[in-house]
Structures are given as structure tokens and as C-alpha cells.
Amino acid sequence: MVNILLVSHSHQLAQGAAELVRQMAPSDSVKIEVAAGIGENNEDLGTNAAEIMEKLIELQSPEGILVLMDLGSALLSTDMALEMLEDEQKAKIRMCPAPFVEGAIAAGVQANMGADLDAVYHEAMSALLAKQEQIAPGSAEPPSAPAPAAEDAAEQSEFTVVVSNASGLHARPAAVFAKTISAYNAKVTATNLSENKGPLHINGLIAVMLLGAKKGDTLRIQAEGSQQAEVLAALAELFRSNFGE
């Protein structure tokens, strides 16, 4: 699994963001660490290149490490930390300019799905699309779902469902939705028929949130692949159970 390091001037901010990620994407496999603050008990504002380096060594994994930073010296300190590492140690480390909190959550969910470093980076970079679309509808440009190949189209299955969650498919159920799909050998697309959004290829948290699904909206869920029936059954059960809420 891809691991995540959060570098911030504020220890409290970084710990809070890390806790949000752990709540959204509970996992024993994805490690999330912070390197934040300076001084006694990291209580003062600032960043420490030596601490960042130590955390990067601690988080080393074959799949790699995504590093998110808040601003200013956090980037400079991370650069310094990377310079102190051997080439083979930093080969699988990626600095990411995504928004700190939203990017961390998106990256954590994607890493928990078993995605590679490139996919985790891309999901983090897309983290603001859902907020942008909610505040200024039509301003975001979500990727459309690729059309199924002719030989797959006939095998595509689907169901429609009315969202019954009081808050719609907000971040937590969206993360569960995406995580459930990752367990099956199938490609899932979703369309919000009530809002005319989609179809979107559901390959992570952000794609689900871009549906803008509110309570009462009707969704069409489609799947293709060797486990299309299984993934649709699992998703239908999530809606029946209100995603555990």
C-alpha cells in the first residue's frame, strides 16, 4: 500500500487531518504519519527537515509514499529532507501540491483501495473538484466514463436506486462506495438521473462526490466485468442499509 506523510507548520492541524483520513479510510495497511511543528512537544509553529527525513525512512514501502504539505517552509523542508536521502530511498516518494486536508482524505481513500502511487497522486490532485462543483455548479470538469467496448456493452448490468441517506452521498458513504467497488473485478459507472450528472467512472472518492447525490435523487449504477453481478449486489446492499448510517 502507498503510505502518506502530512507535513505542516501546525502539529494540531496535521494530527487532525490524519485523524480525518483514518476515520474516512480505516486501514491497518496504509500508514499515515505527520511531521509538523517544532520545539518542545512540537508545540511551536514550523517544520523540521530532520523529522521529515526520519518519517520518510519510517514510511518506506515498495508502493511508495505520497507527501502533502501545507505551505511555505513545509515545501522547503521537505525538499531538504529528500536531499538527505539516498537516491534509492527517494525514488518512490512523491511530493503532491494538492490541498492539504481534501487531498489527504482523497489520497487516503485511494491508497486504502490498493491503488498505485500515480493513482493516489491523481486522486489527491482532483480533491477540490467536488467542492468546486457544489459551490459553482458547472465549473468543474469531471471526467466522463469511457464508453464500454462493443463486446462488453451487451454484458453490462445495472440497477436504479433512490438515495435515502439524510445527507446524501457525503464523504463517508462516498468512501465506502468507492472502497466496496475496489474489492471486485468490475468497472462501475454511476449517473445521477435527477441532476443529469454522469455517467462517471467510479474509481475513487472524488468521482462519487461529483455525482452530487442528495436524499431523494435517483441514481443509475452500471457495471461490467467478470464480477459485475457481485459488485452490483454489494452496492445495492449498501443503499438498502443506508451505508450503515
Image (spheres, rainbow, N blue to C red):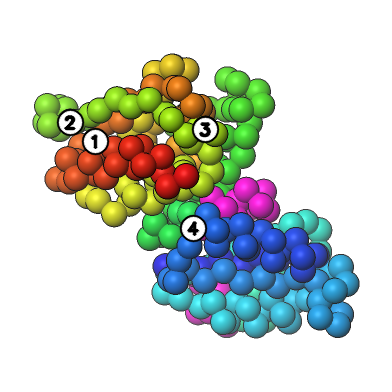
In which quarter of the view is residue 77 placed? bottom right
Name the residue: 61% across, 72% down: 33
Above or below 73: residue 49? below
Three-letter amino acid code at disc 3?
Answer: Ala
| Chain-order first, disc 4 or disc 2 | 4
Q: CA distance from mark 2 to mark 1?
A: 6 Å
Disc on the earlier residue, 1 or 4: 4
Please indicate whether residue 159 sits to the left or right of residue 144 in the image: left
Label 2 Cα crowd, 10 Å radius (few <14 / some 14-19 / many 20+): some
Q: Where residue 139 sits: x, y (%)?
A: 61, 23
Please give the residue where the numbered disc 2 appears in the rendered image.
156
Label whose residue precedes the other's in the sequence (2 or 1): 2
Q: What segment carries the magenta color?
A: 86-108
Q: Residue at x 38, y 51 (%)?
A: 179
Q: Is residue 107 magenta?
A: yes
Task: List the residue tagged with mark 4.
Answer: 25
Which element is circle 1 on? strand
Comes first in the chain, label 3 or label 1: 3
Q: Badge 4: how crowded within 10 Å, few (<14), some, or many (20+)?
A: many
Instruction: Check disc 3 and report the residue beneath it.
Output: 166
Inter-mark Cα distance, 4 to 2: 29 Å
